[in-house]
Amino acid sequence: MSDVPNYFAVYSAREEQLNDVRQAARTLADKFDLAYWRECDKESKYPWDFVNAFAEAGWMGIMMPEEYGGMGLGLAEAAVMLREIGASGAGMSGASAMHFYVFPPAPILRHGSEDLKRRALPGFVNGTTLMAFGVTEPTAGVDTSRIKTRAEKKGDRWIINGQKVWSTNAQNATKYLILARTSPRDEKRPLDGMTLFYADLDRKHCEVRVIDKLGRAAVDSNEVFIDGLEVPEENVIGEVGKGFSHLLDGLNPERVVVAMEAIGIGYAALDMAVQYANERVVFDRPIGKNQAVANPLAECWMRLQGAESVALHAAMLYDNHQSCGPQANTAKFLGADAGYQACDQAMQTHGGFAYAKEYHIERLWREVRLLRLAPVSQEMVCNFVAHKVLGLPKSY
């Protein structure tokens, strides 16, 4: 467990490039002020202006190889970009909008045929293709092996029937990445027999129902009911029956960027709280002069700093083609907790007016809470670490 590469040496070699990404991403994100994000949240309005600005600047393809029109940069660069979006005050409304252009196409890039990559990837890079993600099902939960959506082969096409839940972007998406069973569940190898498909989100065969939820109203979440959706054979991603293993390739990098998004949101809330604590005068003194206010904020900063170090460590391992599962999962756990605690303490610092939406803290608080649940719960991260890292008996 202690045998890890020298993260600091690797980081130092890329520090200048990472700082360039930080500065450029933050400069662009700051063009969209807090009022813009409040309106998107209040009106459940997808942030197209924000998305298009990042697309025009080329950021959608930050991790995409140059041969498909991308920047060809690494996970560390993508992570700091998303951290800055979160820290700008955009919260998950901005981070999710970018996140779903950058990471869901990963299975296509890693396992798709060259023909599929040539057809699909440029649209993600230039921002013209918006894709929803269909994995989770209401009856399966975190036990993906028990999904019931099925795909049956008929000639040169697959016919898909089933139900998905928490499909982000499905209100606006034109494409759908779907995981479906193509053979019955085998108790000995329960995660085999599932296949990934790159499908048109055909509204004649897909009924999309928006989910009313606590936060991130600007980026929709949906139930999708699939009835006879046809997908051509050439849009199968990778090997039939190995879809879940193809999907896993993208999980570690997603955990890293989710951590950095939460950390960025935490810093945004912390900055607001510190400013308020310096300016708000009660009993003839700024409230920040009281240790009961100042010390919890200091603790939040330290937690955010620690979580960010772990997240960048995991990103560097990934970019250097080294195992990063424990570090990526740890980053997700620490980042989600640190981000949430910072937002919660910022709300406590502001007092009742924060709860009454006088400030923007409550929006960040609502949005960052999601990341303790998704894309993987804190409990499942602990299960992974207990079993895979510590060698304890498997509990799930």
Image: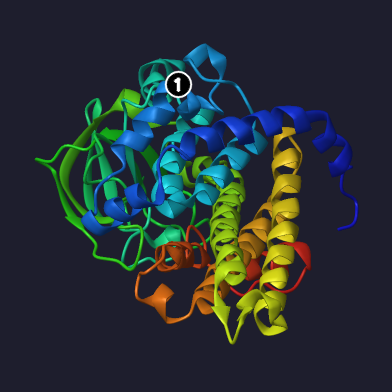
Residue 222 lies, with reference to residue 62, above or below; the image says below
Where residue 321 sits: x, y (%)?
Answer: 73, 34
Amino acid type for the residue under numbered disc 1: Ser
Which residue occupies the extreme left position in the image?
204
Residue at image point 47% right, 52% down: 89
Q: Secondary structure at mark 1?
A: loop
Colour pattern: rainbow
Which residue occupies the extreme bottom position in the image?
283
Residue 176 lies, with reference to residue 261, above or below; the image says above
Q: Is residue 181 visible?
A: no
Q: Is residue 27 visible?
A: yes
Where residue 51 sits: x, y (%)?
Answer: 37, 34
Which residue occupies the extreme front position in the image?
284
How crowded pointer 1 is (Cα within 10 Å; few <14, some 14-19, many 20+) is rated as: some
Residue 300 lies, with reference to residue 125, above or below; the image says below
Where residue 343 sits: x, y (%)?
Answer: 53, 68
Image quadrant occupied by the C terminus:
bottom right
Residue at which label 1 appears: 113
**Residue 217, image quadrant:** bottom left
In the displayed structure, does residue 387 sit left or right of residue 26?
Answer: right
Residue at image point 43% right, 23% down: 125
Residue at image point 18% right, 40% down: 229
Image quadrant occupied by the N terminus:
bottom right
